[in-house]
Image (spheres, helix red, strand yellow):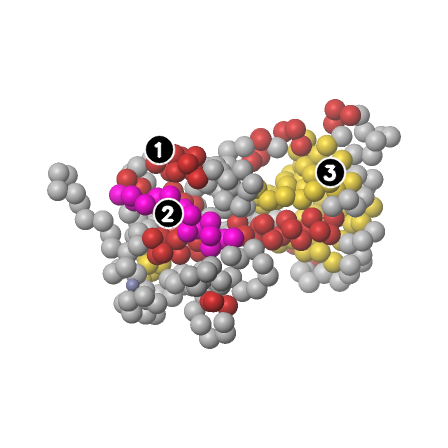
Amino acid sequence: MPEGDSVWRAAAQLHAALAGQQLLSSDFRVPRFATLQLGGWTVNEVVARGKHLLMRLQGPADRTPAEQDRLTIHSHLKMEGTWQVYPPGGRWRKPGFTARCVLRTAAADAVGFSLGILEVVRTADEDSVVGHLGPDLLGSDWDLAEAELRIRAAPDVPIGVALLDQRNLAGIGNIYRCEACFLSGVHPAAPVSTVAELPALITHAKVLMEANLSPGRRTTVLNARGVPVGRTPGRPGYWVYRREHQPCLRCGTPVRRGVLANGAGSEERDIYYCPVCQPFPAASADS
Ligand SMILES: [Zn+2]
């Protein structure tokens, strides 16, 4: 699964290429929308909502009744998906048979490859596709208290599972899940009820994602001023993620990999943690 920052960057790139542009043609290579033709429609904006991409379009005034002149192309990258922007008629870097959506304008072609979800809904009905999401860590309407409330509603769920549940809060994938738990000294399998500093843990995830909105290698190793120092060649980019058997950057203990059930995708069942910095909570005296 992508992390929310990848989707945010994809939305920013697509917005820069397409916003204000009229589509010369559209080509939806999925059965449900194979006959849909959005040539003449104008892209108003492209935004990310958690890990979902929303391209909002406006119909040609002379042809579209006002009540249905706003459509949203909703996509989700899932495991392998990507959107790429090319100069008009430019040669694709991915195999043509994996293309699911081709949008052509006078300025650029945008091609969505291997998209996990691709559908077109009325903009007024966007809630039917993203309304279930919790507060968006990178959204302008981010609400820490609401995210904490949603997570706390299921106190027995492992914190590592709760962080990936996009209904609680939207945008975290496996990397930020593991790294935020490390920075908070919390074992990813610990039940939510044992995590006293939940707001701080969530805030770690948000700060790490925001530090990675600019281009460059993703890293969670920041200095005290929030500058990503983990981009330096030869330095580890992550504290624990995919660093199994390597020494913890804080205490030197070998990092461990474990499996957390109830995770979404198979790749997201893997957790990485330092057994010393992130001890599993001891049973309380009265249990
Ligand atoms: Zn450690």
The kind of residue tagged 1 is Ala
Residue 27 can be seen, yes or no: no
Circle 1 is placed at which residue position? 153
The kind of residue tagged 3 is Leu
* Label 1, label 3: how far apart the Cα atoms are: 37 Å
Query: Which one is nearer the viewer's eye here, 67 or 90?
Result: 67
**Dot 1, crowdedness within 10 Å: few (<14), some or many (≥20)?**
few
- Prevailing secondary structure class for the magenta stretch in the rendered image: helix
**Dot 3, crowdedness within 10 Å: few (<14), some or many (≥20)?**
many
Q: Residue furthest right?
A: 62
Describe the element under mark 1 as helix, strand or loop: loop
Query: Which one is nearer the viewer's eye here, 155 or 277?
Result: 277
The structure residue drawn at horizontal position 56% and vertical position 41%, both measured from the top left corner, is: 140
Beta carbon at label 3 within 8 Å of ligand 1 = no
Residue bounds of the magenta highlight = 194-210
Circle 3 is placed at which residue position? 57
Locate residue 235: give its quadrant.
Answer: bottom left
Residue 211 can be seen, yes or no: yes
Beta carbon at label 1 within 8 Å of ligand 1 = no
List x then y, in percent, for residue 182: 35, 56
The kind of residue tagged 2 is Ala
Q: Residue furthest front?
A: 225
* Label 2, label 1: how far apart the Cα atoms are: 18 Å
Locate residue 139: give its quadrant.
Answer: top right
Q: Residue furthest left?
A: 285
Give the left or right position of residue 282, taking residue 58 as reference. Answer: left
Query: Which one is nearer the viewer's eye here, 110 or 50?
Result: 50
Describe the element under mark 2 as helix, strand or loop: helix
Mark 3 and mark 2 lie on one chain; the one further toward the N terminus is 3
Circle 2 is placed at which residue position? 200
